[in-house]
Image: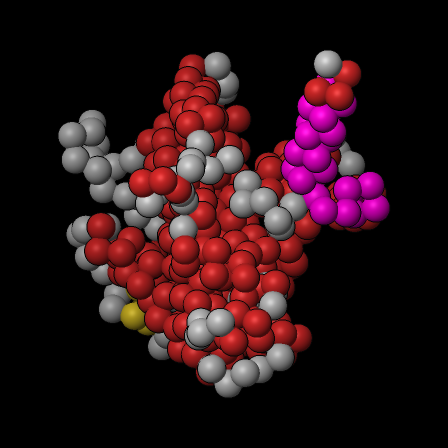
Amino acid sequence: MLRAPSRGFGWIPHWSWWAGVAASFASFLALPAFVSEYALLQLSVIAVLSMLGVSEGFLWGFSGILSFGQTAFFGLGGYTYAVAALNSDHTALPLLGAIILPGLLAAIVGYFMIYGRIGEIYVSVITLVVTLILEKTMRATSSDEYVIGSVRLGGQNGIPTVPPLNVPFTADGTLGLTGVYFLSGICLLAIYVGLALALRHRWGRVLVAIRENERRAELLGYDSRIYKLWAFVVAGMIAGFAGALYGIWGNFVSPEMFSLGQSAQILIWVIVGGRTILAGPIVGCAVIQYLTAALGTAAVGQVTLVLGVILMLAVVLFREGVLPAAWSGVHRIQSRLRRAD
């Protein structure tokens, strides 16, 4: 629900939405006291990967651009942070560079695709090709001459010993396991709230209108190209930031961050969780990552096969995704209770 627009702030969500956000934040802060270090490690990577899923969900679900290039920005952000941090004593600027550089790549690629009026299917193909090119390029950097500053790119082996984020007023000046958990969770919540507010604002409403009917939006005087380009750049920057946090979380980056399998997995998160709700990719990522870890712990041999069956069942039973289906069920129950009263 949105507030009445009497004061010109009709785009601000209802207080109940803010109460839900506050409750989620409070639960997130209290969780480390009740879980093990291993669970905290898994929750941290789920939060990081959820940012990547949210970037795809925002781009596909609200601007209508199906991109296979989020892993390109994800990997570029991770490598940018790793190389820059290993070549300097500070990590704040490398983290900023991991946001800016993927954003610049997204602006360049998006400009030629969107302003070139390329069809939707060709946009998906081009973003897929960009991802494959970057993956093959990074895999071919195993020789000693592929060095940036003092850092070897490592080819298939990637870059180990990625520096942790420097934080003042801590025991060793860096983020520990709990610090990475809090950082990733707070950033995920901030990205979600920021995108949710943007989508409720005039800019977001126009973006959704362009997704629904681009020609009609243009006839109303809106330049659909600039809106779609901005959405593409924002999604690329979020993916790059997630890549940097992934490198910080695992102290390692590799060409697998660019892989086609990772790109397909992002789409699975969005499909399972629901692309019409911004929180859908978060739920999808959490469900798939939990099932992957649980099946691996249970020594199930064909984890990919089992996940494939679960995905097919999810698509058949919940065509719009798990979260939209649950939301619709709650509304139906509320409607029946009102009619009964």
- Give the vertical position of 161 relative to 225 (above or below): above
Q: Quadrant of residue 253?
A: bottom left
Seen as rendered, the residue at the extreme front is 6
Q: Nearer the viewer, residue 281 or 128?
A: 281
- Give the vertical position of 280 relative to 212 (above or below): above
Q: Nearer the viewer, residue 213 or 289?
A: 213
For the C terminus, give its image quadrant. Answer: top right
Seen as rendered, the residue at the extreme bottom is 116
Q: Quadrant of residue 239?
A: bottom left
> Over which residues does the magenta segment extend?
314-337
Residue 260: percent from left, percent from top: 62, 64
Q: Quadrant of residue 61?
A: bottom right
Residue 159 in sight here: no
- Main SS, magenta region, reads helix
Residue 220: percent from left, percent from top: 49, 71
Q: How many marks?
A: 0
Q: Nearer the viewer, residue 339 or 247?
A: 339
Residue 250: percent from left, percent from top: 44, 44
Residue 20: percent from left, percent from top: 47, 26
Rendering colour mode: secondary structure
Residue at the spot 74% in from the left edge and 29% down from the top edge: 332
Residue at the spot 65% in from the left edge and 46% down from the top edge: 274
Residue at the spot 33% in from the left edge and 66% down from the top edge: 101
